[in-house]
Amino acid sequence: MSITKVTQHPTQNEGLIFERSQTGRVGYRLPKLDVEAANIDEIIPAELRRGDGLADVPEVSEVDVIRHFTRISTWNYSIDLGMYPLGSCTMKYNSRLNEKVARIGGYTNLHPLAPEEESQGALELMYRLQEDLAEITGLPGVSLQPAAGAQGEMTGVMLIRALLDKRDGEASKDRRVMLIPESAHGTNPASAALAGFTVKAIRANEDGLTDMDHLRELCDQGGVAGLMLTNPNTVGIFETNIKEICETIHNAGGLVYMDGANMNALVGVARPGDMGVDVIHLNLHKTFSTPHGGGGPGCGPCCCTAELAEFLPVPRVEKTGERYHLNYELPNSIGRVKAFFGNFGMMIRALSYIYTHGAEGLREATETAVLNARYVAHELKDTYHMPFEADCMHEAVFSHKHQTAAGVHTLDIAKRLIDYGFHPPTIYFPLVVEGAMLIEPTESVGRADLDAFVDAMKHIDREARETPELVLGAPHSTRIGRLDEATAARRPVLRWRPDMESLGKSA
Amino acid sequence: MSNIPENLKYSKDHEWVSVDGDVATIGITDYAQSSLGDVVYVDFPRAGDKFATHEAFGSVESVKAVSEIFTPVAGEVTEVNEGLNDAPESVNNEPYGEGWMVKVKMDNPGETDALMTSAEYEDYLSSQG
């Protein structure tokens, strides 16, 4: 027996709020007018009025609105529902304790323009977080201001540019090449270009590591301002030559920026500053468990060497004696990169995460994250193609190579995982691996969940051989099945219009 | 197996070139469109833009990824295929026809001699595994 989906039944689907509209229905009741009624024509100029009587705005009751949006909210998959192995994104559990701390009235009720003497607690929190991030990265200069990773990246490369301009003067303009591995996150070349650099791609060798000969060759060509490197890199492998890489760049007169997206593999174990890195951004919303997904808010602090610190954004949080204050008097600063001081709520949660774990706990979290990824790699290496031999760190990359003969590709495997109750991994990234699946379990997942995930992946492989149509048509358990992503991207429908009432009914 | 017309020249970046006097028409190969998956947007240069050999002149966005496209020959862009703005699927459906991308007035028409023939491109594809 097959189940027929009834599109208007609320447990199986949810229409648009516009379709619930009933003429004259309202979600409010105003008290009786106890003053003289004003004529709207006299108090609001005609050109400021819509004139259509709010036609097409849905007329619904409060309970209609609440149920509509609550039902839709149950369609979401979230980190609170289950494993979310989205490689590179580090979807770790966001502890309730962090939320409790972030709701302390002294923080939530503080105005960002309150005077320093009334903001000492908030400033102390920021100062302490700066100190801890400096200790964790081995880089003493810290700005918490960047709003998220990409802005942290841009801040980082702008610091490099500022230092080169000061150091080399006019000659700095001949030093505008930023080296970036071909497997890098797409935001790296974008940040470099925005900061006025030209990007040259570094090849990887067959082990998935930076090709040292190619790196030296590019340095010999001259004009190198710096390197943007993710470590562990985007295929989840630690760049074992990192010290030599940094030396090569430094000898060529450039600086090393590290993308901190993968710091979850290093915290408490190894420090970028000790490896020779000059500047790094951190994603508090990844590594330090502040909530993300759905667009933010993130927090992308920038940590740098003492040499680069004079260029950090203003204001900087400093401590004199027992008093915390904001320092705007930094003449060489690149300026502000974000209004006020960044996303303060995320700083509270990140510090709560650090204090909850302590040094030992942070190290254990890192070790568990790597152990979990290696467990998945070990359990799946005979089922799914692994393009690289080296042990992975906190995430493992596979490809669809063993399944394509049956016509099943990465996208199909990802869609079928939804039927097994898991959020799909990151797919088709990194680009250097054809049909990539980048799996990052994080430390938040226990053995039982890892085994269930591995089991699902093995089942999907078997289905790909025995009943490929099951995988190709997935997902089957969701309210809406396989979406036509190509048409959605080619001809996006971004808003409802009155003449689209038949939308969704005709299809 | 990929469709590789005999009358065209090919680059290692999987672009094809059709030559008419000193004007080269450039698109991406059947193999390229098949690897990219459903193309949803093509980002072009403007007519009049000049490019050196192997410079990125635009990008192709598919449901999987955004990939740069490179000029196999140096020259000045004379025309872009505006039709792809409304029908990017032509790149998938007719990579060698309606899916063409740009026409370039070549600085050095002899440059196409360095590109691969269809037979050489076929060998190149098999060597890529």
Image (cartoon, coloured by chain):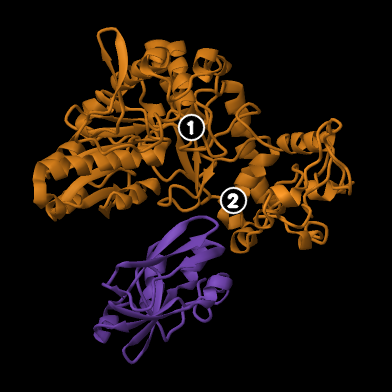
Residue A286 is situated, as x and y percent measured from the top left of the image, at 46, 30
Q: Is residue A251 visible?
A: yes
Colour used to depict chain A in the structure image? orange
Judged left or right of residue A153, residue A441 is right
Is label 1 on the same chain as label 2? yes
Identify the residue position indicated by label 1 in the image: A90
- Badge 2 sits on which subunit? A
- Tell me what residue is drawn at x 43 percent, y 52 percent: A431
Q: Quadrant of the C terminus of chain A?
A: bottom right
- Left or right of residue A156, residue A298 in this image: right
- The residue labelled by disc 2 is A411
* Spot occupied by residue B108 in the image (x, y as percentages of width and height): 24, 84
Q: Residue at x 25, y 25 (%)?
A: A139
Dot 2 falls on a residue whose secondary structure is: helix
**Residue nearest the viewer, comparing A378 with B68:** B68
The chain carrying label 1 is: A
User: Callout 2, which amino acid?
Assistant: Leu
Q: Residues within 10 Å of mark 1 (few under 14, many from 20)?
A: many
Where is residue A453 shown, x and y percent of the image? 61, 32
First of labels 1, 2 by sequence position:
1
| Residue drawn 82% across the image and 61% down it | A506
Q: Residue at x 50, y 13 (%)?
A: A106
Residue A41 image position (x, y, % from top left): 74, 52
Q: Which chain is purple?
A: B
